[in-house]
Image: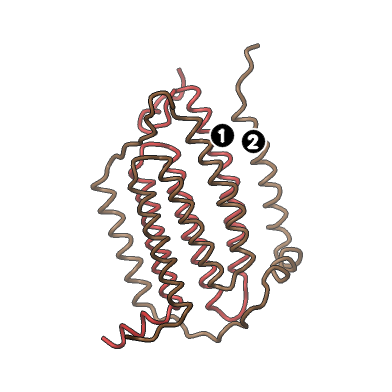
Amino acid sequence: MIDMDFSAIIFYIFAVIILATATFVVLSRNIVRAAFALLFTLMGVAAFYALLMADFLAVTQLLVYVGGILVLLLFGVMLTNRQVSVDIRSGTMQTLPAVFIVSALAGTLGGIIWSTEWPAVAELAEGSATAPVIGRMFLSSYLLPFEIASVILLVALIGAALIARRERTS
Amino acid sequence: MTDMMSWLAEPGLTHYLLVSALLFALGLYAVLTRRNAIMILMGIELVLNAGSLNFVAFSRYSAGTIDGQIVSVFIIILAAAEAAIALAIVLNIYQNFDTVNVDEINRLKD
């Protein structure tokens, strides 16, 4: 038996959770079950962020993806399917070409990642909080993208409200 | 064989990139095969997460900067905006067509 680091065991647990639930999302025919499987995929990615010393990003992932986007997707599922007929299923199409394309892509990416000699790196300082650093960078070197992102969020908010609103019969 | 075992025992940049590549491929498969527009959105979320994971992994295993994490925050911001707009469009399509299957939505105008 090889001796494995504790973080290595955690890495493999969450890698299995991410890939298994993502496969379920892709293959499940029931949309609601796919949405709930997506919950665990997103949580697994948040755990990966925590493993990669990105504590602020891990919390942001939980708040925005799990708390926001997933709930939004579930609203979409509930509002666009007739519950009366209990038919929350969705079909697939072009399965065979898609399998071919996707496996070719995954093989190419995996081969490239496998064969590349990634430079060895110095260890990052352990346990340093990233939130203050990220905040300082947002208000100094990334100020313009930060402001643009806030304007984009405002525009998206107004646009979504405008598009989703029922048209009044005048 | 022992090389392989020791490689498996120490997760590094390659491991995260491989998980991310598989996640990307799964998301792309959902985008390509699904008929329901909301399932396609879920596939897009998987693809965005894979890209974001790549940025964070490179940021962790590079020379002490966290610029990659900043890019990841922007990806999350754009994903939130994209999900809101796309779901509004899907709801509108549902009101007009009574379906959200993308292969049945083939008219621009009644």
Q: Of residues A3 and A75, which is closer to you in this image?
A: A3
Q: Is residue B25 left or right of residue B61?
A: left
Q: Which residue is mark 1?
A: B88
Element type at mark 2: helix
In the rendered image, the residue lying farthest to the front is A1
Q: Of residues A92 and A63, which is closer to you in this image?
A: A63
Q: Residue at x 50, y 64 (%)?
A: B53
Q: Position of residue A166 (x, y in %)?
A: 60, 22
Q: Please tell me the colour of chain B.
A: red
Q: Of residues A18 and A157, which is closer to you in this image?
A: A18
* Chain shaded brown: A
Q: Residue at x 46, y 49 (%)?
A: B44
Q: Position of residue B93 (x, y in %)?
A: 49, 28
Circle 1 packing at 10 Å, graded few (<14), some (14-19), many (20+), is many
Q: Residue at x 67, y 41 (%)?
A: A155
Q: Position of residue B25 (x, y in %)?
A: 36, 57
Q: Residue type at mark 1: give it.
A: Ala
Q: Is residue B19 above or below residue B29?
A: below
Q: Are marks 1 and 2 on the same chain?
A: no
Instruction: Identify the image quadrant of residue B98.
Output: top left
Q: Are marks 1 and 2 in contact (CB under 8 Å)?
A: yes
On the rendered image, what quadrant is the C terminus of chain A found in?
A: top right
Circle 2 packing at 10 Å, graded few (<14), some (14-19), many (20+), is some
The CA distance from mark 1 to mark 2 is 9 Å
* Mark number, residue A98: none
Q: Which residue is mark 2?
A: A159
> Which chain letter matches label 2?
A
Element type at mark 1: helix
Q: Residue type at mark 2: give it.
A: Gly
Q: Position of residue A88 (x, y in %)?
A: 39, 33
Q: Is residue B50 above or below residue A95?
A: below
Q: Is residue B50 above or below residue A77?
A: below
